């Protein structure tokens, strides 16, 4: 079967992920050669990619009118019917395509996914079609994505994991595979917020169009910002102990506290922030660092958390930096720093 050069050019454009240009090219060809069934089928594929399912269905029907046994047209017809909600007709179309060519992986993977909706309690058939698809198309990510869907739906964990590994083998930047593998690594027990942010930033570098990874990175950075509040409260407690804000045991320290003691407390507070926040921030990937500033700029709760941490730290600095001669004002400062943090610390966990 000879393919017209203009149709070949249009198919090349389609395979280069330029469906709009491919549709225009094949449309010009069909204006002069309306009886080219291959061109009608390719037009249907372009329309499917552009989300125009009714038009794709009509193009497939025209191709089948001209050549009733054309495999690609049956596939396009079934694909369009599925997205139009006519699942039983879509199943019949893909089964007919499989009868024409049992080794065609496109109809196999579509039928496997259709079985998840039409026969969710019968995993064997869906898995069988998915296995044939990956056997016939092992170097195509679409077949492995279908295997991952089917295996995940039917709780075949090992098979789903293998599908992700194979997708990454074929395409290390595949959005689904990078997202799943990154989320799995970040979800391991004991993973810190900083480590999770690094993983998500690395995943986004490989798959920049993953909305899931972007949201995960925002949440990890927010966890880091919430952690700074604990550093601030630690500094506040250190300052309160240094100045002996709330004397116990009946014997209070003489005020003002010696300058050397207060300088030592300031040094310890600097160490807390240096190792607990600044050093950790500097070791983050650039993407995670940029997310910190972006999240604070665009979201309310990160600003609240950061503001509370800054306020508590400022109060701690005032407690140890000034030579207080009585305890009333330091006690007020302590409660002004502590109470706002305690009021929100258990309610703002999932605000991002």
Image (cartoon, rainbow, N blue to C red):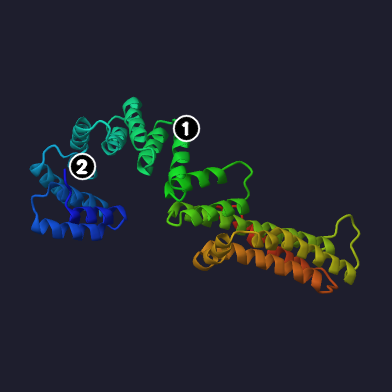
Relative height, residue 16 to residue 122 (above, below): below
Tell me whether circle 2 and circle 1 mark residues in contact (CB < 8 Å): no
Disc 2 versus disc 1: nearer the observer: 2
Q: Which residue is label 1 attached to?
A: 157
The residue positioned 84% from the left and 74% from the top of the image is: 323
Residue 305 seen by the camera: yes
Q: Residue 339: horizontal and vertical position, in percent? A: 66, 60
Q: Which residue is label 2 attached to?
A: 72
Quarter of the image with the N terminus is top left
Camera-side residue of 347 and 191: 191
Q: Residue 124: horizontal and vertical position, in percent? A: 34, 25
The residue positioned 57% from the left and 60% from the top of the image is: 288
Relative height, residue 36 to residue 276 (above, below): above
Camera-side residue of 99 and 218: 99
Whichever of callouts 2 and 1 sits on the residue coming sooner in the sequence is 2
Relative height, residue 133 to residue 259 (above, below): above
Between the residue at mark 2 and the residue at mark 1, the CA separation in whole angstroms equals 33 Å
Q: Residue 287: horizontal and vertical position, in percent? A: 55, 61
* Secondary structure type for disc 2: helix
Total numbered labels? 2
The residue positioned 16% from the left and 40% from the top of the image is: 70
Camera-side residue of 91 and 249: 91
* Secondary structure type for disc 1: helix
Q: Is residue 219 left or right of residue 70?
A: right
Residue 350 seen by the camera: no
Q: Is residue 19 left or right of residue 308?
A: left
């Amino acid at each position: 079967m000879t393919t017209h050069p203009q149709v070949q050019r249009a198919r090349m454009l389609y395979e280069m992920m330029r469906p709009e240009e491919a549709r225009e090219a094949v449309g010009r060809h069909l204006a002069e050669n309306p009886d080219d069934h291959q061109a009608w089928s390719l037009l249907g594929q372009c329309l499917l990619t552009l989300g125009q399912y009714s038009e794709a269905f009509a193009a497939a029907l025209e191709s089948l009118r001209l050549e009733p046994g054309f495999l690609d047209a049956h596939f396009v017809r079934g694909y369009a019917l599925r997205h139009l909600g006519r699942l039983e007709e879509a199943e019949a179309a893909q089964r007919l395509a499989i009868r024409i060519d049992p080794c065609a992986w496109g109809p196999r993977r579509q039928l496997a996914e259709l079985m998840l909706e039409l026969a969710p309690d019968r995993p064997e058939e869906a898995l069988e079609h998915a296995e044939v698809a990956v056997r016939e198309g092992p170097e195509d990510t679409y077949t492995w994505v279908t295997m991952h869907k089917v295996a995940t739906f039917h709780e075949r964990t090992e098979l789903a994991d293998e599908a992700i590994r194979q997708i990454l083998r074929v395409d290390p930047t595949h959005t689904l595979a990078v997202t799943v593998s990154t989320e799995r690594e970040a979800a391991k027990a004991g993973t810190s917020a900083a480590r999770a942010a690094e993983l998500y930033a690395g995943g986004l570098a490989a798959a920049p169009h993953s909305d899931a990874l972007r949201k995960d990175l925002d949440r990890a950075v927010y966890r880091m910002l919430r952690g700074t509040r604990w550093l601030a409260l630690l500094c506040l407690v250190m300052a309160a102990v240094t100045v002996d804000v709330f004397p116990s045991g009946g014997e209070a320290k003489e005020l003002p506290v010696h300058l050397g003691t207060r300088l030592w407390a300031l040094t310890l507070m600097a160490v807390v922030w240096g190792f607990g926040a600044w050093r950790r921030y500097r070791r983050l990937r650039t993407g995670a660092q940029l997310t910190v500033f972006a999240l604070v700029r665009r979201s309310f709760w990160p600003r609240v958390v950061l503001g509370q941490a800054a306020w508590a730290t400022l109060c701690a600095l005032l407690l140890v930096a000034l030579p207080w001669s009585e305890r009333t004002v330091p006690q007020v400062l302590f409660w002004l720093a502590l109470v706002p943090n305690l009021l929100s610390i258990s309610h703002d966990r999932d605000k991002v």
